[in-house]
Amino acid sequence: MNNNVIDIQEIQPRPQGVVITTIGVGGGGSHMISHLANTNPHKAVKLIAANTDMQDLYTANADVKMILGEKLTGGLGAGMRPEVGEKAALETYEEIKAALSGSHIVFVSAGLGGGTGTGAAPVIAKAAKEIGALTISVVTKPFKSEGNKRAKFAEEGLQNLKAESDCIVVIPNERLLSIIPPRLGYKESLEIVDDVLARAVNGMSNMILNHGPKDINVDFADARTVMSYKGLALMGIGEATSDNAAIDAMREATESPLLDNISIKGAKGVLVSFEFHENHPLLGVNEAMEIIHSVADEYADVIYGTHTRTDVDENYVRVTVIATGFEKEIVTSSNSQAQTKTAQEEGIQKINESFRIVSRNFKEENGLFGDELEVPTYLRAARD
């Protein structure tokens, strides 16, 4: 095969404005892309599947399918060797950059521990950064039953990916065992992980791309403002249908059963997007925001937007939260609870009563309530 892009299918025309690309790397990443395609993502989101395994690639549901390192691997995969995955991506580096060209935000998804995802994902993230895109990686870590070798590869790949990404979502597969029903099938269980990617991409996309007459818009410049802070970043997405839907959705956004607990207290930047029926009460939104206010830095940039819909229940709310700019990266409890406590004590500033809230349409100074909250992470990021 002479052309590295083996199949290109434009599902629909791309609108002018912010372009978001999601690229799945390796078998796990490509499966995430296929799952995302089935969730009806925003039309401005471009889906790419990239793999060294040609046979697996053909089954992916994506706008663009790209074979990595065809000369090196012959389209037969990386053979559980991350160095082969890395070399394959380097062989196809210019084609990768061309496929990502024009993107303002790039999501890189991969399953760590194998060959292609572990080795190629950092190279692809680097390519995304080189074209000037905000680069967010979403990766899984293997089950313990997959062995120490895969675990070692995953940790090494994670460190390499951190160096090339603005933000990184880490989903430990082992945590799935504590939340899935005992009788749930293997395929359905893994779809829970795939759904994390879909919710992350769709949440970010809707936050930036949806524009209505009654919306408070969060534009790409707003997102850049929050993501420009150095250090740890957290991301959460929640939805609820209830009398207190805004609060319930916000709490879901700041609590993830898949990840270990760490605190977001002291964030310098917070980006929040609400999606709800146009008749949803404003009071609920204000109360939900107090959860964020109680943990952010005294002078944090808290940027929020709203997107109203008529095709959802009046008691439905969806929330996307991104928090950035911590003084120190906080160690997760799975590594050391003592280290977590120390990092929180040393790196977190006291919570004060006023916060600077910034949106495109207004600014306001608010007094805020609440005890300090221990908020689990949905996304952790280490940026240079």
Image: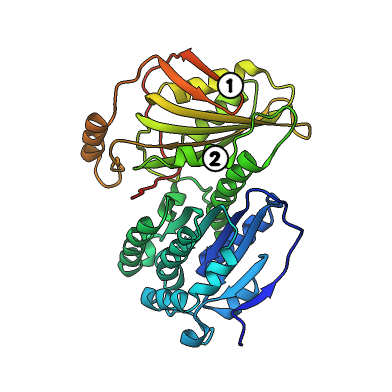
Q: Nearer the viewer, residue 234 or 304?
A: 304
> Which colour scheme appears in the figure?
rainbow
Left or right of 164 in this view: 50: right
Task: Point out residue 79 in the picture as x, y percentages from the top left corner.
Answer: 43, 80
Name the residue furthest top: 367
- Quadrant where the image shows the N terminus: bottom right
Residue 336 against residue 95 in the figure, above or below: above
Amino acid of disc 2:
Ala
Going from N to C along the chain, the mark reached first, 2 or 1, is 2
Task: Point out residue 360 in the picture as x, y percentages from the top left corner.
Answer: 59, 28
Residue corresponding to mark 1: 362
Task: Point out residue 275 in the picture as x, y percentages from the top left corner.
Answer: 65, 33
- Quadrant assignment, res 101: bottom right
Helix, strand or loop for disc 2: helix
Amino acid of disc 1:
Phe
Residue at coordinates 69% horizontally, 49% vertically from top-left? Answer: 42
Residue corresponding to mark 2: 221
Q: Nearer the viewer, residue 152 or 47?
A: 47
Task: Point out residue 129 in the picture as x, y percentages from the top left corner.
Answer: 46, 58
Q: Nearer the viewer, residue 60 or 163?
A: 163
